[in-house]
Amino acid sequence: MRRLLNILVVMILLAGLLVGCSSNKEQSQPQSPSNQNQQATTYPLTIVDDTKTNVTIQAKPQRIVSLLPSSTEILCALGQERNLIAVSQWDNYPTDIQKKVEFVFADSLNPNLEQLINLKPDLIMFWQTSQVSIDKIRALGIPVVVLDSQSIAQTYEAIEKVGQITDSTQQASRLIAQMKAKEEEIQAKLAQLSPQRKSKVWLEVDSQLYTAGSGTFLNKIITKAGGQNIAKDIQGWGQFNSEQVIEQNPEIIIVTYSYVDKDAIQKIKTRKGWQNIEAVKNDQVIDIDNDIISRPGPRIIDGLELMAQAIYPELFK
């Protein structure tokens, strides 16, 4: 059970959140990024984060702590890298980001509150962990924003919202336009498939056969890439046994943990009884970088493309 908990925590951290609030009702009214034009942001700014909490930001953030890898990637893509003062140990993109900040938090679930105060941030990007942790961060009196994107569409909304918060709406609009254009290209290639042609996919996030089921971000990526997740009938994260995978006979096996086990693919190919699985017989056991396919940030369309290429390589030659 502890192993499963650790896996799920890592997956959430690598993909993708917390609540900030303002009790001052005389602050500016909540604004929706989709209703804003591309003019400069006016502060004080009150937005509604993904926990439906009003968060008021008094001035353009100059000292940002991001404890969510996807938020860090969004901020950097919008040119806000210079304003990032701290990230978590899971924030590894851009590759040199940890060297550029003032502090790297080892524990992004329960960050050291004294250290947070000492950094004097004017904005914290957190994630939706326990209510106790959320309340502790809120009590610091620093604006805290949650971005809990659960789809590509929500990822676009998150980028737009961060653009508004950081007075970089034009950069956000350009980035979203680029991402949408690439997404359309991918979908145009997948449109060549017949409606009946949906390859069965087994996604393996751990050697103990943990996988992503219905309702997870990764299940949505598989589906959007034209695949059929053989674990779609389970809700959320779950564990299969070997016989279940063999019985489902997937045509593609996606591995996301080769970064911790370099021999993961070879071990899968030599598992007892797996030699007759279509994916193994046809050498379709494929490693995909977990960070790229699970983080709801600027690289998620790259992740969608990698998934689609893995399932239908003939369309992406």
Image (cartoon, helix red, strand yellow):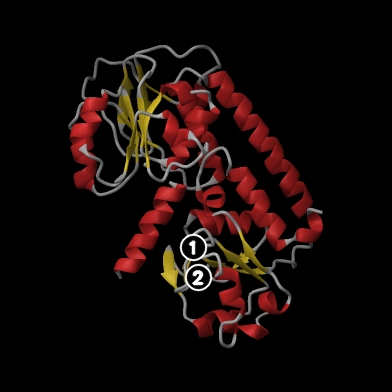
Sequence-first disc among 2 and 1: 1
Q: Which residue is mark 2?
A: 233
Vertical order, 91 against 169 (above or below) = below
Kind of residue at badge 2: Asp
Q: Residue at x 60, y 81 (%)?
A: 270
Q: Are marks 2 and 1 in contact (CB under 8 Å)?
A: yes
Residue found at the far front of this picture: 99
Cα separation, mark 2 vs mark 1, equals 6 Å
Q: Looking at the image, can residue 84 be seen?
A: yes
In the foreground, 306 or 178: 306
The picture places residue 294, in percent across and down from the top left corner, at 51, 51
Question: Label for residue 1?
Answer: none
Say which element carries label 1. loop
Whole-percent x, y for residue 9 in the image: 36, 56
* Direction from residue 41 to residue 128 in the image, left or right: left
* Residue 214 vs residue 121, the one in the foreground: 121
Residue density around tag 2, few if under 14, some if 14–19, many if 20 or more, within 10 Å = few
